[in-house]
Image (tube, rainbow, N blue to C red):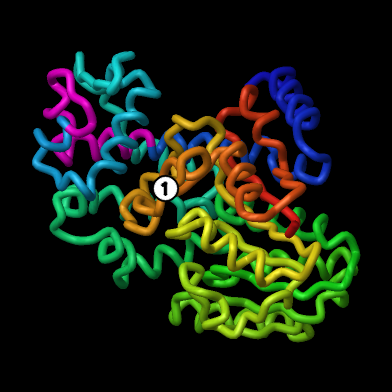
Amino acid sequence: MPIASRRNQQDERAALLPAELVPLFDDHFIASWDLIEEYIARLALVVFRSTGLGEACRHDATVEQAIARAGLSPTIARVPAAWILAMLASRGWIERTPDTPTRYRLERTTPALDPAEILERQSVHDPSCLPCYALAALAAQHYRPVLRGEMTGEQALFGSEGISAWVKYFSNDNPLYAISNSVGALAADRALSGHAATILELGGGLGSGTDALLAHLHESGRASLVSQYRFTEISALFLKRAKRPLLARHPAAPLAFEALDIDQPFIESDVLPGSFSLVYGVNVLHVARDLAATLGEIRVALKPGGVLVVSECVRPFDTTPLHLEIVFNLLSSFRDPILVPGWRPNGGFLTPEQWTAALEANGFVDVRIFPDIAAIRAAYPSFVVAAIAAARA
């Protein structure tokens, strides 16, 4: 890229992003983000062929018709197949008709694009991002059996090979995931505003979000304001793996570790009403089966005026297929939540407007999205990392 063009892009990012986020989204990071998007688009081509969807679209087909022609499970394959077809259509690799319902057609041979070429480029540019590639490749190789109902996505992604891949993926050593932790930590610090805090973290996973937040508070000189930090996670394995390194890295932090299922009443995990000033989570609320019920539990757990901060992958536009979905579309918890017209039209990732409507409909006020995806998306439609903050009404 010519130096002048690179400088113009840097200036544009500086105009659109809060100042503290600009260093996180530098040219080096953006290059890796562009590469993983291209890699996953090429994987989608591979999956398109391996699942039989390619042959199914030799003639006009709705998503449902393509699934039936390919012999896939209609209940399991609906969301993943729709994503594959939308992803390929967004690249111009298959045709999408303006009909209702939408029809897809493979009018010519799909391009011969090898995902391995992009993997090699990433290996040269920044090998620390490769855990994202490993997880996407693991998902892609299991699409056919999962979509045919021969195994579950959970079995495909959480076997011994999968656990190793997740550990490397959910890490602050992986820049493409760590960005969510960094943005979340900055947003949580903003929400605390220098006041004393009791923190409940939901879906803490392997602890990288906790690590990033506590490290940020330590660097800013505000770690002493936290009188309680309750780390919760549904997976006993993840909870065990997170505990030892967090205690070692943050020996002075008031950490406690407990099991909690965001789909169950929080009181079952001894979360008392009005006991926390901040409820925090990184990439967790989008998998709530009943988002209204979970938001209700969060509201009850917060003190009056308390704040919810969640770092999430935010869908910029309602119909945009996101590259991360190649992995998560295999999981039933991602695909099949309780839907709510107006703010929960699909499983998984939501738009800024849908997050705002969801929070306001469930007892929250002063909803803020950091950075403002709605203001950024026209210039950067691939910008999907943000934190959503809202106060208990």
Q: Residue at x 28, y 23 (%)?
A: 101
Q: Which residue is mark 1?
A: 339
Q: Residue at x 31, y 53 (%)?
A: 330
Residue 121 appears in the rendering = no
Looking at the image, residue 251 sits to the left or right of residue 34; the answer is right
Residue nearest the observer in this picture, 11 or 371: 371
Q: Residue at x 30, y 19 (%)?
A: 100
Q: Position of residue 109 (x, y in %)?
A: 19, 19
Asked if residue 240 is positioned above or below residue 32 in the image, the reply reads below
Q: Position of residue 265 (x, y in %)?
A: 52, 74
Classified by dominant secondary structure, the portion drawn in magenta counts as helix
Q: Where are the magenta residues, as a range?
A: 41-64
Whether 44 is among the magenta residues is yes
Residue nearest the observer in this picture, 90 or 269: 269
Specify the quadrant of the image occupied by residue 172: bottom right
Quadrant in the picture for the N terminus: top right
